[in-house]
Image (spheres, rainbow, N blue to C red):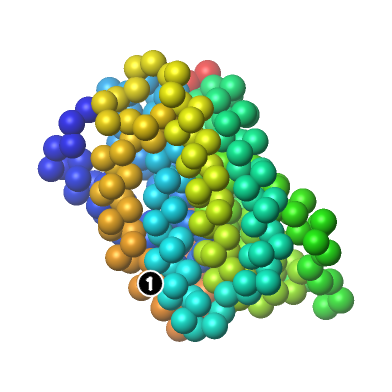
């Protein structure tokens, strides 16, 4: 699989879209990246089951760069709840390593595609429901935050997303204002991505038939192109998050997620 001009254009466009959504909604862009990277890699001769794993790992690796760019823009607006980040991050690292170095390596790509479809569909339904939390509900104590972080890191590692599909609903459920939840989710994307990326690089070392220029499950040429494009757009999305009707945009995005979940469901069933 060579990095021809058409592939560069496809990956760059994907990176621009993923970066914008990462800044706008705090989702890390992975929900959009994984289905399209899967399709791009599969179309160039990589086994579909392996392509799913590579797409998840490569998507996660891009979030290392996207999250830094996005969180800087949110931090400048004073929207990041760093107290929440410090409490949740240790659990995220634990959950991320369990997913990327354990469960991910054991599960077949087809089952990961089905898991991805399920959680993306769930996330889309939560966006549409927009349920209001009880006014008295608050964030749990330190142990509860570590436990929540472990779940977020684990689920993110399985689907290659930055965790916003779990962390944003979790924080808003605990009465964290939506703009703070989105900004804090962007900050949480870095430990999520870093822990899982290390795990994907290590757990994929023994895998055969990987394309050239791969680091474990991570396809480095795609990582380079997508990361450069997404870093440019993440601050634009973060700025838009403070000026656009995010709730309305979330509803539109939810329908896009349903379509992507359907595609991954199709890929997963077809690979069984």
Q: Residue placed farthest to the left in the image?
A: 5
Q: Residue at x 19, y 45 (%)?
A: 8
91 with respect to 23 (left or right):
right
Q: Which residue is mark 1?
A: 235
14 with respect to 252 (left or right):
left
Quadrant of residue 169 within the rendered picture: bottom right
Asked whether residue 39 is in view, the answer is no
Q: Which quarter of the figure is the N terminus placed in?
A: top left
- Asked which secondary structure carries label 1, the reply is helix
Q: Residue placed farthest to the right in the image?
A: 136
Q: Please tell me which residue lies in front, 205 or 5.
A: 205
Asked whether residue 197 is in view, the answer is yes
Q: Residue at x 45, y 38 (%)?
A: 57
Q: Residue at x 41, y 29 (%)?
A: 216
Give percent across and percent down for residue 193: 50, 49
Give percent across and percent down for residue 170: 70, 61
Residue 148, placed above or below residue 262: below
Q: Residue at x 28, y 47 (%)?
A: 224
Residue 14, placed above or below residue 262: below
- Packing grade of label 1 (10 A; few <14, some 14-19, many >=20) is many
Q: Please tell me which residue lies in front, 161 or 35.
A: 161
Give percent across and percent down for residue 15: 32, 54
Quadrant of residue 247 within the rendered picture: bottom right
Give percent across and percent down for residue 44: 25, 28
Q: How many marks?
A: 1
Residue 44, placed above or below residue 10: above
């Amino acid at each position: 699989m060579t990095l021809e001009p058409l592939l560069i254009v496809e990956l760059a466009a994907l990176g621009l879209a993923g970066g914008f959504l990462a800044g706008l909604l705090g989702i890390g862009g992975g929900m959009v990246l994984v289905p399209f990277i899967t399709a791009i890699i599969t179309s160039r001769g990589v086994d579909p089951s392996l392509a799913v794993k590579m797409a998840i790992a490569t998507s996660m690796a891009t979030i290392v760069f996207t999250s830094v760019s996005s969180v800087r823009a949110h931090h400048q607006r004073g929207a990041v709840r760093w107290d929440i980040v410090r409490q949740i991050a240790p659990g995220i690292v634990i959950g991320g390593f369990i997913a990327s170095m354990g469960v991910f390596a054991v599960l077949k790509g087809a089952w990961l595609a089905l898991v991805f479809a399920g959680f993306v569909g769930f996330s889309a339904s939560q966006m549409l429901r927009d349920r209001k939390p009880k006014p008295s509900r608050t964030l749990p104590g330190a142990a509860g935050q570590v436990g929540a972080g472990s779940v977020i890191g684990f689920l993110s590692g399985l689907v290659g997303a930055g965790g916003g599909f779990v962390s944003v609903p979790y924080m808003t459920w605990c009465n964290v204002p939506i703009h703070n939840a989105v900004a804090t989710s962007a900050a949480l994307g870095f430990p999520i991505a870093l822990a899982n990326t290390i795990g994907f690089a290590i757990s994929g070392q023994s895998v055969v038939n990987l394309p050239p220029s791969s680091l474990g499950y991570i396809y480095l040429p795609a990582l380079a192109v997508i990361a450069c494009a997404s870093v440019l757009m993440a601050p634009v999305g973060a700025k838009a998050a403070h000026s656009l009707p995010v709730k309305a945009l979330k509803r539109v995005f939810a329908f896009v997620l349903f379509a992507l979940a359907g595609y991954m469901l199709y890929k997963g069933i077809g690979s069984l």
